[in-house]
Image (cartoon, helix red, strand yellow):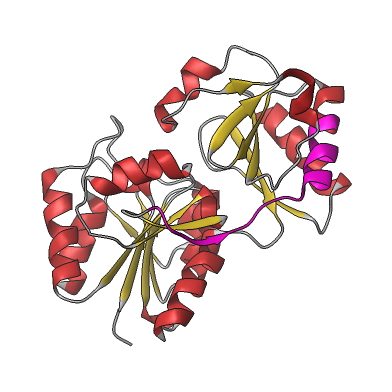
């Protein structure tokens, strides 16, 4: 079946390691759009950060999937298409558990980054974010509105695995936990992922999963790579993404996304 929609992850997939998009990639993606293919950026980034990267593609006002599918926003107008997240009560339970265990926690509400207090991780992870954290002390553990995502960060894989195990066991059936790359452990409301967000957009346009081409590199891309009729993990991808994808394409540094689009679609 012919491809109608192309879903593209940013970090480690479309973006080079220095967080830039090559002119070649931009030109190929715009050419694909001009030939009628729907282009959807699907990223784990927060909205403000995702928007700034998407703007450099010059795709016009198109749906942009951010927060690994928790939000879908119109890329130029900022109009919300869909927004979801953890309930305040559930988020509070998770955050209080993290406090008891001494984990480095960050929460996102209304596209603002919140922390209890500075913990030394801010500078290291700023490359993924376009805003500075807001420190709110004890209030951090008692949110009063929908929490888009909770993120734990630790450079130790052993600790990340332990965090994941605790959260998945204590909040079973209520959350989805993924390793999106780097030192992060992302916690979303159950059922939130890039595949669900892409499927939502496809349903609006009468596009089937078999008509989707997708690109990714980490665990937060796995549901999308499994769903899409044509899916590629870049060669620098995590093992779990490579196993989920139907094929491997050249790395992010080699413009693998654009090379594959050009070869297969144009």
Look at the image and tell me in which quarter the N terminus lies.
Answer: bottom left
Q: Position of residue 234 (x, y in %)?
A: 35, 51
Query: What residue is drawn where x is 45% and y is 63%?
Result: 245
Above or below, 174 against 12 in this view is below
Residue 111 drawn in magenta: no
Q: Position of residue 170 (x, y in %)?
A: 88, 45
Look at the image and tell me in which quarter the C terminus lies.
Answer: bottom left
Query: What residue is drawn where x is 30% and y is 48%?
Result: 54
Left or right: residue 119 compared with residue 197: right
Q: Position of residue 77 (x, y in %)?
A: 34, 55
Left or right: residue 195 compared with residue 190: left
Above or below, 200 against 165 in this view is below
Snapshot quadrant of residue 119 = top right
Residue 83 drawn in magenta: yes
Above or below, 67 against 103 in this view is below
Q: Is residue 178 visible?
A: yes
Report the magenta residues as a range: 78-96
Query: What residue is drawn where x is 63% and y is 13%?
Result: 118
Left or right: residue 207 compared with residue 15: right
Q: Position of residue 61 (x, y in %)?
A: 29, 60
């Amino acid at each position: 079946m012919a491809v109608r929609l192309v879903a593209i992850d940013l970090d480690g997939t479309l973006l080079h390691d220095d967080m830039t998009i090559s002119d070649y990639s931009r030109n190929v993606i715009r050419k694909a759009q001009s030939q009628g293919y729907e282009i959807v950026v699907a990223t784990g980034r927060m909205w403000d950060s995702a928007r700034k990267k998407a703007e450099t593609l010059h795709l016009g006002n198109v749906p942009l999937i951010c927060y690994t599918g928790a939000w879908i926003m119109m890329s130029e107008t900022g109009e919300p298409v869909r927004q979801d997240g953890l309930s305040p009560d559930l988020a509070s339970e998770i955050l209080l558990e993290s406090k008891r265990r001494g984990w480095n926690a960050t929460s996102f509400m209304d596209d603002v980054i919140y922390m209890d207090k500075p913990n030394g991780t801010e500078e290291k992870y700023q490359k993924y974010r376009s805003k500075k954290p807001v420190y709110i002390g004890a209030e951090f553990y008692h949110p009063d509105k929908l929490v888009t995502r909770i993120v734990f960060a630790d450079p130790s894989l052993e600790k990340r695995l332990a965090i994941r195990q605790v959260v998945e066991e204590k909040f079973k059936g209520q959350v989805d936990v993924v390793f999106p790359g780097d030192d992060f452990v992302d916690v979303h409301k159950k059922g939130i992922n890039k595949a669900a967000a892409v499927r939502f957009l496809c349903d609006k346009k009468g596009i089937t999963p078999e008509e989707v081409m997708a690109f990714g590199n980490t665990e937060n891309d796995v549901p999308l790579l499994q769903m899409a009729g044509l899916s590629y993990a870049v060669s620098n991808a995590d093992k779990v993404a490579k196993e989920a994808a139907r094929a491997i394409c050249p790395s992010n540094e080699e413009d693998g996304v654009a090379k594959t689009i050009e070869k297969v679609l144009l």
